[in-house]
Image (cartoon, helix red, strand yellow):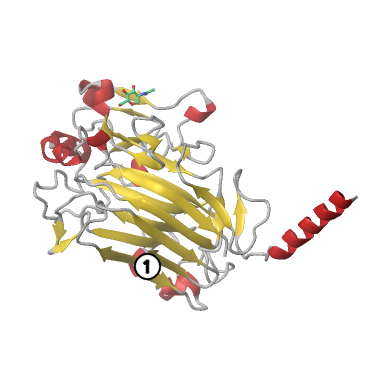
């Protein structure tokens, strides 16, 4: 009787302590009840929990013709000393060099965990030829697509960016359900991206390891994307590869705010016209606003999941053609042979990756922890 009573009291006091939150969650690892201020998702990477982190398995190149294949292999993604490492390696180490220009790569597997995750852009199967070589780099991209997605909250990821020419690390969020349609209509939240080049400048500005940026992508269709009005960078002369930093997002029903080490990088507080007005799309009467029945935060008023990856190169202009680097950028962004040109110039970039020293840690994206709190 007493223990029953005590139990009821405990439940009652727990109930009183839980202030309901505006944050909503879903996924296999989402809490059943969301209390205001509570930690609702976390990983310290003491072990590699693939129930939380699903690997991408695809050759697709992320829509930017990036040069890597993403797979589930402990040479490219692993936890060690309480950190997640995403480390690039050469495809030729596994399959030989001839494979790149003459091989057939079908990444589809039979086990549920081995299925190709992105068939777009020839993502599941490619045939190499001398001009159109197979993805020369192997890397990893992990995501909480099944385990956890959330709408509104606070995110903090403590991470160290990789160094090495043409490496492109990213920690970001994508919409769980594409409520407003396909990219970029349902939005994209880039918590941090950087470039691994140690001494690369563009128009006199260091845009390599000394720069980290956050971006929102949103718009009615791919060619109309308002990211330039929601993109911020911060420079750090020591380089974001030299230390761990805390990359933070505060996402509320009123604004999105990015910070690094508690210092605000940028924020968007849309007015009543929402992101349609903020992006300047309202001047064009011929396009229908996909967010017209959403809140002023739309498309950023629906659930998103987390992604951590290390990409290489690509032709979308993240590495501009006009950069100045100790060795020239090996490919033009308009080139149909970009991957081949990149691979043929490996004498220039491979030594900067230091893959043979210290277990390739220089070129690895390292994540100490991920923490997400309810508002
Ligand atoms: C994992 O990657 C390593 C390094 O490239 C390779 O030697 C190994 O064969 C790969 N394992 C599988 C199962 O593909």
Q: Which quadrant of the picture is home to ligand 1?
A: top left
Q: Quadrant of the C terminus?
A: bottom right
The residue to which callout 1 is attached is 230
Residue 268 vertical position relative to residue 2 in the rendered view, above or below: below
Tell me where residue 182 appears, x and y as whole percent.
48, 52
Relative to 111, residue 237 above or below: below
* Residue 328 located left or right of residue 106: left
Q: What residue is shown at x 40% (from left), y 27% (from top)?
A: 107
Q: Residue 185: in sight, yes or no?
A: no
Dot 1 surroundings within 10 Å: few (below 14), some, or many (20 or more)?
Answer: some
Residue 313 image point, x, y percent: 24, 45
- Residue 283: image quadrant is bottom left
Q: Nearer the viewer, residue 186 or 9?
A: 9
Q: Kindly state the secondary structure of the residue where label 1 is placed.
A: loop
Quadrant of the rendered image containing residue 56: top left
Extreme residue toward the bottom, this view? 272
Question: Which residue corresponds to the image point at 46% horizontal and 51% vertical from the top-left?
Answer: 370
Q: Residue at x 24, y 36 (%)?
A: 358
**364 versus 248 height, above or below:** above
User: Is residue 86 something that shows in the picture?
Assistant: yes
The answer to whether mark 1 is within 8 Å of ligand 1 is no
- Could you tell me which residue is drawn at 57 percent across and 69 percent down? 295
- Looking at the picture, how far across and down is residue 127, in whole percent? 30, 26
């Amino acid at each position: 009787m007493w223990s029953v009573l005590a139990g009821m009291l405990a439940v009652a006091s727990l109930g009183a302590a839980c202030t309901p939150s505006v944050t909503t969650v879903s996924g296999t690892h989402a809490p059943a009840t969301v209390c205001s201020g509570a930690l609702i998702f976390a990983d310290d990477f003491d072990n590699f929990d693939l129930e939380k982190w699903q690997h991408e398995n695809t050759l697709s190149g992320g829509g930017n013709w990036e040069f890597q294949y993403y797979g589930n292999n402990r040479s490219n993604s692993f936890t060690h000393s309480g950190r997640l490492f995403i480390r690039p390696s050469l495809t030729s180490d596994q399959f030989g060099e001839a494979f790149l220009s003459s091989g057939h790569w079908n990444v589809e597997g039979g086990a549920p965990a081995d299925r190709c995750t992105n068939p777009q852009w020839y993502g599941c199967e490619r045939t190499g030829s001398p001009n159109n070589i197979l993805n020369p780099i192997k890397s990893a991209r992990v995501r909480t697509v099944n385990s956890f997605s959330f709408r509104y909250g606070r995110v903090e990821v403590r991470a160290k960016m990789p160094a090495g020419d043409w490496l492109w690390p990213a920690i970001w969020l994508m919409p769980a359900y594409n409520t407003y349609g396909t990219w970029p209509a349902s939005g994209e939240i880039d918590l941090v991206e950087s470039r691994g080049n140690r001494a690369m400048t563009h128009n006199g500005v260091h845009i390599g390891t000394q720069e980290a940026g956050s971006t929102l992508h949103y718009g009615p269709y791919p060619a109309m994307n308002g990211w330039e009005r929601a993109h911020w960078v911060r420079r750090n002369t020591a380089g974001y590869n030299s230390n761990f930093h805390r990359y933070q997002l505060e996402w509320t029903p009123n604004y999105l705010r990015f910070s690094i080490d508690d210092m605000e990088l940028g924020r968007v507080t849309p007015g009543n016209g929402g992101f349609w007005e903020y992006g300047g799309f309202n001047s064009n009467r011929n396009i229908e606003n996909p967010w017209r029945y959403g809140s002023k935060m739309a498309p950023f008023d629906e659930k998103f999941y987390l992604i951590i990856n290390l990409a290489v190169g690509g032709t979308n202009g993240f590495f501009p053609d006009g950069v100045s680097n100790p060795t020239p950028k090996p490919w033009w962004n308009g080139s149909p042979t970009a991957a081949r040109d990149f691979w043929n110039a490996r004498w220039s970039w491979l030594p900067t990756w230091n893959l043979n020293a210290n277990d390739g840690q220089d070129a690895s994206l390292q994540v100490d922890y991920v923490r997400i709190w309810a508002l």
